[in-house]
Amino acid sequence: MRAHEAGALHGDIGSRPPWLRPPGDVNALVPELWPRNVARAADGALTVAGLGVHDIAAEFGTPVYVLDEDDLRSRCRDFRAAFPTEDIYYAGKAFLCRAVVRMIAEEGLHLDVCTGGELATALSAGMPAERIGFHGNNKSTRELTRALDAGVGRIIVDSFTEIDRLTALARERGVRPKVMVRVTVGVEAHTHEFIATAHEDQKFGFSLAGGAAAAAAFKILDEGVLELRGLHSHIGSQIFDANGFEVSARRVLSLQAQIRDARGVELPELDLGGGFGIAYTTQDDPAAPQELAKRLRKIVDSECAAERLAVPHLSIEPGRAIVGPAVFTLYEVGTVKDVDGIRTYVSVDGGMSDNIRTALYDASYSATMANRASVAAPMLARVVGKHCESGDIVVKDEFLPADVQPGDLVAVPGTGAYCRSMASNYNHVPRPPVVAVRDGHARLIVRRETEEDLLALDVG
């Protein structure tokens, strides 16, 4: 289902999703939804790594993205332990800043970028270029030139135009960059239409069914300028079911066998993508990294045996699964409005400028009172923002204490991925800061934008 641009005006009046039930304790936290170091103190206020949200709000203001640094590092280590011989690519598009680049580099991960800006951020933070993969369906000559000059580890080519462009640049420089061919395998993940990326009618990759993927691989091998390392597929995002990977692996390894039979070359690498899901609400049940690793290895081993292929070196892309659960957004309540007993709107000081996913993808989120505990009964509420849009919704449906009032703090978990990175200045609202908390101490890693920042770009 696609979110209507008129948002709440076209919502189901007074209804709630079937998975949302009145809580026995409105103050209880569902552990799966929150960073691992979030808890309630004796006074009922949330703490992260021992630091209270009152202190965070007092020092940094609201809204603010709060990153539990040890949680993020632990998730990196969980994937590293589950995939000890594979390359794990952190999704730069989910959230990228120099501090996070350093964290994932220190934890031994690789990094995916898909624009010149993301590449610049990675390089400026000291990410080893050989551990960077460069994605994108329309990489410019300038971006490819920078990638070659930096020595990025692999470039995932996405069109014949890009192959020609990169080949010409490589010839000019006398270099042989490593590339992978992105294959559109015709598998659509069970996810929102806008973020399902492997069905045929889309902008990404080379079609397998139409023969373009094979033609791209043959072109690279025959010209001999670029070093073709392997094939890449990506079937979507927020994926919980491994069945799609089985079909994808079968199809992409069939192409690998076709390349071997036609050119006598067994490509040494395979990237099955990832886009593993996280828990935004209690309806979500993500698999543990160890279970994902076991399933993916079994799939690859089985399909390689069927095609009589040596098992290639595998890469995965966990997507939002690393940074998504490690962050929550902290807001202050401004108004509480009961609309004729139909619905209660709790308005906060952020909104669609710091989390567009609810409006864009019809995404669901959870929320909790953050500054205190309450003995009031649970009340079904809708958490909305301050923007001039009826579709400015942060959390469509959630049970909050019936005594929620202006000045209270509300926290929304699961906002580490695609919230700050997709944030905007709609209504000329400055974007919030990002604060990393560790061992009871907070440090600013992305500062809050100011009105001066906005005006500095206005040259009129």
Image (cartoon, rainbow, N blue to C red):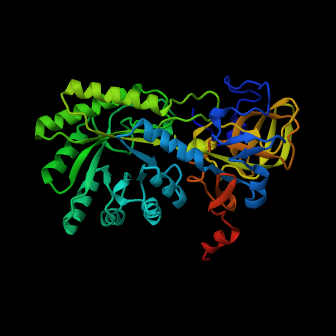
Query: Residue 14 falls in which quadrant of the image?
Result: top right
Left or right for 34, reference 89: right
Residue appearing at x 82%, y 40% in the figure:
44
The furthest residue to the bottom:
460
Query: Residue 295 falls in which quadrant of the image?
Result: top left
Residue appearing at x 83%, y 47% in the figure:
408
Residue 245 image point, x, y percent: 38, 30
Left or right for 191, reference 154: right
Q: Quadrant of the C terminus?
A: bottom right
Residue appearing at x 61%, y 37% in the figure:
362
Does residue 7 lie above or below 378 as drawn?
A: below
From where the camera sits, is residue 394 visible? no
Residue 130 image point, x, y percent: 33, 57
Q: Nearer the viewer, residue 290 or 203?
A: 290
Left or right for 275, reference 301: right
The total of numbered circles placed on residues is 0
Left or right for 207, reference 262: right
Does residue 221 lie above or below 145 as drawn?
A: above
Residue 107 image point, x, y percent: 47, 50
